[in-house]
Amino acid sequence: MGLLKTIAILIVVYYGIKIIGRYIMPLFIKKVVSNVEKKYKQQQEQQQETTGRVGETVIAKTPPKTKESNKSVGDYVDYEEVTDD
């Protein structure tokens, strides 16, 4: 009796997976693909909005700030080069 019950369960599981694979999975995959398409379109629209008009120059990054000299290092000595004439 246990062998027949096991075979019946395997047959039900097999046909259950077959039905899910044939009818339910395509609907699930179609839903996932449509969500990916929506996200892609939103990204493209957002990118077009940020780029601005055609021919417009946009500088995206700012130049690095120059470091200020440390004034407590010492005195600045001005010198002139002397030639032996």
Image (cartoon, rainbow, N blue to C red):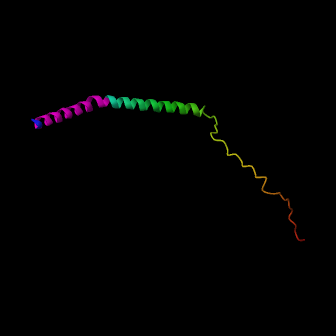
Give the quadrant of the C terminus: bottom right
Residue 63 x, y percent position in the rendering: 67, 44
Q: Is 28 left, or right, of 2 in this rendering?
A: right
Residue 68 x, y percent position in the rendering: 74, 49
Q: Is 7 left, or right, of 76 in this rendering?
A: left
Outermost residue, left direction? Answer: 1
Magenta region includes residue 25: yes
Residue 44 x, y percent position in the rendering: 51, 32
Q: Is 43 left, or right, of 77 in this rendering?
A: left
Residue displayed at 54% across by 33% down? 47
Q: Nearer the viewer, residue 65 or 70?
A: 70
Q: Is 83 left, or right, of 26 in this rendering?
A: right
Up/down of 57 relative to 78, above or below: above
Magenta region includes residue 66: no
Residue 3 x, y percent position in the rendering: 11, 38
Give the quadrant of the N terminus: top left
Outermost residue, bottom direction? Answer: 84
Please tell me in which quadrant of the rendered image residue 30 appears.
top left
Residue displayed at 20% across by 34% down? 13
Outermost residue, right direction? Answer: 85
Up/down of 47 relative to 76, above or below: above
Residue displayed at 46% across by 33% down? 40
Residue displayed at 76% across by 52% down? 70
Main SS of the magenta part reads helix
Q: Nearer the viewer, residue 11 or 47?
A: 11
Outermost residue, front direction? Answer: 2
Q: Nearer the viewer, residue 3 or 63?
A: 3
Up/down of 76 relative to 64, above or below: below
Q: Which residues are magenta?
A: 3-26
